[in-house]
Image: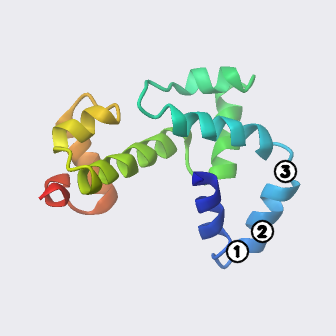
């Protein structure tokens, strides 16, 4: 579902044709589809770039470069954005406290979570929760 949502937004951009060409004609995209699904399923656990690269049978620099070419994000940034998005959903729809949401999406430090949330959304997570 997340891949479909990304594709939906991507094809609305001005350079949609080049994006579609990349996805449809790039044989390297398809193994990453499974990897991205795995990341989306396991965002609550510790995900290391070393482990992801090893599972794709790639060196870390090659994995990093190809992942960024396909998603537009570094693997770490993709995981961080996914976790922050899931946390926002918990704050808004499930009435989690900031601490509960941070812990649920694998942030050990509430202050780090709050800083990154504010950097990503432009406001503190407390505002969301209230």
The residue lying at 40 percent from left, 43 percent from top is: 83
Count all numbered tags in the image, as a single digit. 3
Q: Nearer the viewer, residue 108 or 103?
A: 103
Look at mark 3 in the image and give the residue it sits on: 26
The kind of secondary structure element at disc 2 is: helix
User: Disc 3 and disc 1: Cα gap in Å?
Assistant: 17 Å
The kind of secondary structure element at disc 3 is: loop
Q: Quadrant of residue 123?
A: bottom left
Q: Are marks 1 and 2 in contact (CB under 8 Å)?
A: yes
Say whether residue 58 is left or right of residue 46: right
The kind of secondary structure element at disc 1 is: loop
Q: Quadrant of residue 120?
A: bottom left
User: Disc 2 and disc 3: Cα gap in Å?
Assistant: 11 Å
The residue lying at 77 percent from left, 46 percent from top is: 29
Say whether residue 2 is left or right of residue 90: right
**Disc on res. 18:** 2
Look at mark 1 in the image and give the residue it sits on: 15
User: Which residue occupies the extreme front position in the image?
Assistant: 94
**Disc on res. 118:** none
Colour mapping? rainbow
The residue lying at 43 percent from left, 26 percent from top is: 45
**85 over 106 or under it: above or below:** below
**110 over 4 or under it: above or below:** above
The quadrant in which the C terminus is found is bottom left
Residue 109: % across, % down: 21, 31
User: Disc 1 and disc 2: Cα gap in Å?
Assistant: 6 Å
Residue 80: % across, % down: 42, 43
Q: 10 Å neighbourhood of mark 3: few (<14), some, or many (≥20)?
A: few
Residue 25: % across, % down: 88, 56
Q: Nearer the viewer, residue 11 or 62?
A: 11
């Amino acid at each position: 579902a997340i891949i479909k949502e990304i594709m939906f937004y991507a094809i609305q951009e001005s350079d949609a044709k080049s994006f579609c060409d990349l996805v449809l004609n790039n044989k390297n995209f398809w193994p990453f589809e499974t990897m991205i699904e795995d990341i989306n399923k396991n965002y609550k656990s510790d995900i290391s770039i070393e482990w992801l690269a090893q599972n794709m049978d790639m060196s870390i620099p090659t994995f990093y470069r190809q992942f960024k070419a396909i998603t537009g994000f570094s693997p770490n940034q993709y995981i961080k954005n996914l976790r922050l998005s899931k946390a926002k959903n918990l704050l808004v729809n499930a009435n989690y406290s900031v601490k509960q949401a941070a812990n649920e999406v694998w942030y050990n430090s509430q202050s780090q979570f709050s800083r990154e949330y504010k950097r990503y959304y432009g406001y503190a997570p407390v505002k969301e929760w209230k």
